Image: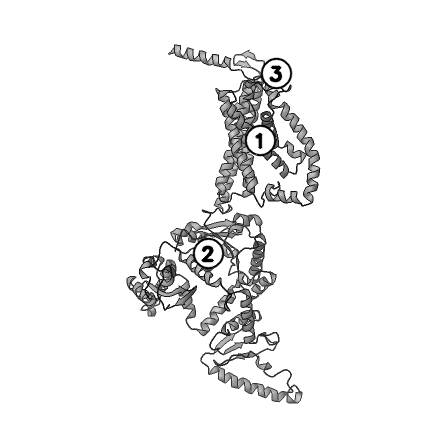
Amino acid sequence: MEVVEIESGGRAARQMQAIRFPTWLEFVDANFFWPFIVQILLTLAFNVLSVFYVHAYNQRGSIYRFVHNYIGTHQHMQVKNPAFIVCCYILQLLMSISAVCMFAARTYTHEVSTAGRAFEVLMCSFFTLHYFATRMQAGFSPASAWSPCALIDVFTVVPVLLPFVIGMEPVPPHVRWLSLGYMRSYRALTAYQRLERTVGLGEVSEFCRRLLLSFLRMAALVICFGCTVYILEILGEIPGWEDRTVDTSMGSLSFIQITYWMFTTISTVGYGDFSPTTIPSRLFIIFCILAGVAFFGSELEAIMEVRSLIHHHKGRYVPRDRDVMHIVAVGPGVTTLSPTMEAFLNEMLDSETGVTAPDVVLLSEDPFEKELVNFARSELPPKVRHHVHFLVGSAMMPRDLARVRLKQCAMAFVIPDMAAPAFISDSQNILRAIEMKRYRPKLQLRLMLLQPESKLRAMNIGIEQECCFSAFEQKINLLAQSTRVRGFLPLVIGLLQVMTSFHYKEACQQVPLKDKKWMPEYLASLRNTTHGFLIGPGFVGTRFEEAAAKIYEESNGCVLLIAAQHRGRLVLNFEGFMTKGQVVIAIASSREACEPFGDAFSDWRLEFLYNREAVHGGPMSPTSSTPANRIMQLSSSIKQMNLTKDDGLQPSRTPRKMSLSRSKSNRSNTSFHPFHRCMSENSNFGDDENEELMDRLVRSREAKEAEELLSDPSLVTLVVTGSSVWPQVIAFLRTLRQPFLPGHQPIIILS
């Protein structure tokens, strides 16, 4: 055994003697002389070139357009056509890693192969091209030529393209394999950083990007420091700077050695059995220890900070899949759990399909309440719970809008706080909407306001009429409809809003004793809602009423067909035969109850929208919903109501007045005149002597009209308690005076 070890040690010694390592003079001559000359020449050239380049760039001509379209600048890395610069960054990353791997392989072979030499020249040619592209980003500034990235490019590329020593003789083979190629690990790091700044990498989570960046930094640090010590140990002591030791009982000591030992001891790194032996490597190790301690401390702190930001909802939205669209909701209303937010989330994330459901990104300026987070995590259907994302930020800040990927979202909503002061809340939400439209002009925005007059202010500022609505106005419209059709509100709420299990149990516990016979069955029916699906193959060719009866019987009364889409329109009680892929609407207890009767492999919503758009894609119909037609209909409604500037519904300064409006079913026009203005202002009864006669006529007409109105069973009395609610009164009257209504109810307005 001892003989084998002696023989192997002898072979290793002979191999070490056969390998010839470069000296300090040879290494500096091959890797620093010509790069230093080239660096000086480039600096001088950039001093002249930068003047002409800046002049041509300020002209905003072809050079300006080329830079902003394909190259970018240090201030604006994102360009319109990023394909070229992104490819450069990716190739820089891959080829720099390849250069480091090639250096590592040569530390074992101690030679440069022909194939390796050709591949190295190819990589350095690309590095040269990318060097000038990055200098163009900096405007060919002379100072940019002395940046770390530029110096690494020069001192790693020039020795490959100019493999000569001072006397223009080729570099000896035993010197060529030892180079500064390992420094390109830092260029791989910077290439990734610039790639992230250019394209954003928004599809990768912030925590993963932070880990990848920390890994690249650690790899660059370890490779650069380790390989530098490797080269210093191979080159040996600097000629004339050899260390001189003194033999003591502790061993051979010197100032450099004892300083190195003490530094490794107090830094808890430890001297170790494997340590550098030369003066340059020991001095460099001290610097490495300091940099390593600072690096790992800062990187660990950065990673923990990212985790803390994500935990406090201050990260960024990362889509699960490129094909999944997302919806952004902002405003003070998204902070707390309210009926508005509950209905919004239930509507956006129904349980029909968990795969195609959109992601809902909530952006709040204040921390989210735990009740809202718990509702999204537990009350929503399991398939869509992970589709809700919570982020804390301001819709007024572009960086926060970038965090929610507003430029890529399908639609955005501004939701107010229903309990906040209306004027202040609407003003703030209008500003949020304007900032979002400024950030993305073609944004599909829906602005929910409280007061009707706020809607007018938003429209005057520049927000489209189709993009904003008033919550109070919608309530007034529903109230007006309920006065015309009794039971309208319960019908609409029962069809469109699903009663959750929590509200169902709470309502069942609060049922009075006198309603025990019928209320439980009524509450159970509120669990039903409308569902859509594509009719199954088994019902194709049958009549609608036959299919409805069969489905109702087979589902034990859980599914009732009420409508079908025909030629792009929904038709109640469709009179015709069912066709393949036809969209039907049913009242059902759950989505699962409809699955046996529908096509489970297709999304009915996409088919519904496609059929509707196919019909509307033709010539514009008179009832098409365009802004121009809606404005014409609104103008027509105002004329029908006589809501003009001279005769509008504005409160009078008289202490008491009563306005009457009446209309019979056979009348097409409606009178909206206050009683004290029933007589024309141009009448001849304006003299003092006729004043008493005029008052008598007015009183008699008021009494007669009041008797007729009070005898009408469809009379509606509207009590106005303040002067600030008149826009809501107008909305109330406009709803009941639509021209398509068959008859108009009489209305009394008390103010």
Residue 579 in view (yes/no): yes
x and y percentages locating residue 64 in the rendered image = 65, 44
> Which kind of residue does numbered mark 1 sit on?
Ser
Q: Is residue 610 magenta?
A: no
Q: Name the residue under label 2.
A: 337
Considering only order in the chain, which callout, 1 or 2, is on the residue closer to the N terminus?
A: 1
Residue 125's disc is: 1
Q: 334 and 44: which one is in front? A: 44
Q: Mark 3 points at which residue?
A: 241
Magenta span of residues: 238-243
> Which kind of residue does numbered mark 2 sit on?
Leu
Disc 2 secondary structure class: loop
Q: 478 and 139: which one is in front? A: 139
Disc 3 secondary structure class: loop
| Callout in the foreground (1, 3) | 1
Compared to residue 315, the image places residue 613 above or below, namely: below
Quarter containing the C terminus: bottom right
